Image: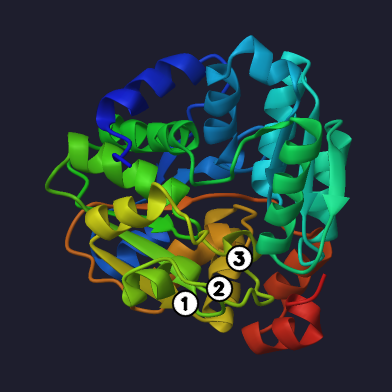
Amino acid sequence: MSAVRLDRITHAQDRIAARVRRTPLVLSLSLSALCRAPVHLKLESRQPTGSFKLRGATNAVLSLSNEARKRGLVTASTGNHGRALAHAAKAEGVRAVVCMSALVPGNKVEAVRALGAEVRIVGRSQDDAQDEVEKLVREEGLTAIPPFDHADVIAGQGTMGLEIADALADTELVLVPLSGGGLAAGIAAAIKGRLPQARVIGISMERGAAMHKSLRAGKPVLVEELETLADSLGGGIGLTNQYTFTMCRDLLDDIVLVSEDEIAEGIRHAFVAEGETVEGAGSVGIAALLAGKIDVRGPTVVVVSGRNIDGALHQRIVDASPKAAISAGGLGR
């Protein structure tokens, strides 16, 4: 399967322009001082649904035929994609069913329901939720909109890369949260197409980093889904992955993993030093910089992918030391 190329991303930008916010790119004084180079935060956490997922979901829904929309939509999600698809489907007056596992935090489940989507909780992994999606496609004829391995979803996420390139033409490094690879693949394609000198590094958690393990194995592999503060990065990449595995393999310059303590410190730093409420997955780039795991050589952009964290968990993390926050229930629901 061919990669999602720059022209498809530019078309997606035109398609979703009226539906998706062009998010701010702000200079972080604290991280710039730490890294001794300009560090900017791309605040996708300020999208209406609280994460970058609105880009891909909106582009995918708007790209469908009328017949496909009439059949209704279905997806598997760790929370943010489901919320984004529910939002995009509601705007079009289309039925949406979102399948999630029992590992998805309750606040994310309720946010999907609040937008009018039907929610099905299935099993304890993204793979279990995907099995339910495939069943609904077979039995009810629903149209599947995958959370990451879909050309229109990838192109939609890639529009963020175009915004970064337009706003900061001398960008040398982009740090992108990495899960199934839709965000990382889309941004890397856009950045490499517009700013070929820039490096793009995927950041994931140590607990269940499926793309990292698959790339090390040279093919998509099954990875146990574990509880983590970066819950939005959980789940496998699919053994029949068509797009994101090869795009991440070919376009990412490196992958860096962060621990649970480091993720907690990223969440805390975002709130205390940057004034931003950020979920675990959205904090991993900040976490990697704070931990000294990134070689920063020049202007750097950190993608802050989302803000949809349970309020009580966020308060515990901000108030406590990293280990105390986790022992107090940071990995639970």
Which mark is drawn over residue 263? 2
Kindly identify the amino acid type of the residue bearing the numbered disc 3.
Gly
Q: Between tags 3 and 1, which lies in front?
A: 3
* Residue 137 vs residue 66, the one in the foreground: 137
Kindly identify the amino acid type of the residue bearing the numbered disc 2.
Ile
- Dot 2 surroundings within 10 Å: few (below 14), some, or many (20 or more)? many
* Residue 282 vs residue 150, the one in the foreground: 150
Extreme residue in the top direction: 66
Disc 3 to disc 1, C-alpha distance:
14 Å
Disc 2 to disc 3, C-alpha distance:
14 Å
* Residue 35 vs residue 301, the one in the foreground: 301
Screen quadrant of the C terminus: bottom right
Q: Position of residue 41 (x, y in %)?
A: 42, 49
Q: Which residue is mark 3?
A: 234
Q: Which residue is mark 1?
A: 258
| Residue found 34% across the figure and 69% down from its top | 215
| Residue found 55% across the figure and 75% down from its top | 223
Quarter where residue 312 is shown: bottom right
Q: Position of residue 75 (x, y in %)?
A: 69, 42
Mark 1 lies on a secondary structure that is strand
Mark 2 lies on a secondary structure that is helix
| Residue found 23% across the figure and 60% down from its top | 37
Q: Position of residue 25 (x, y in %)?
A: 41, 39
Quarter where residue 165 is shown: top left
Kindly identify the amino acid type of the residue bearing the numbered disc 1.
Val
**Does label 3 or label 1 sit earlier along the sequence?**
3
Mark 3 lies on a secondary structure that is loop
| Residue found 36% across the figure and 67% down from its top | 219
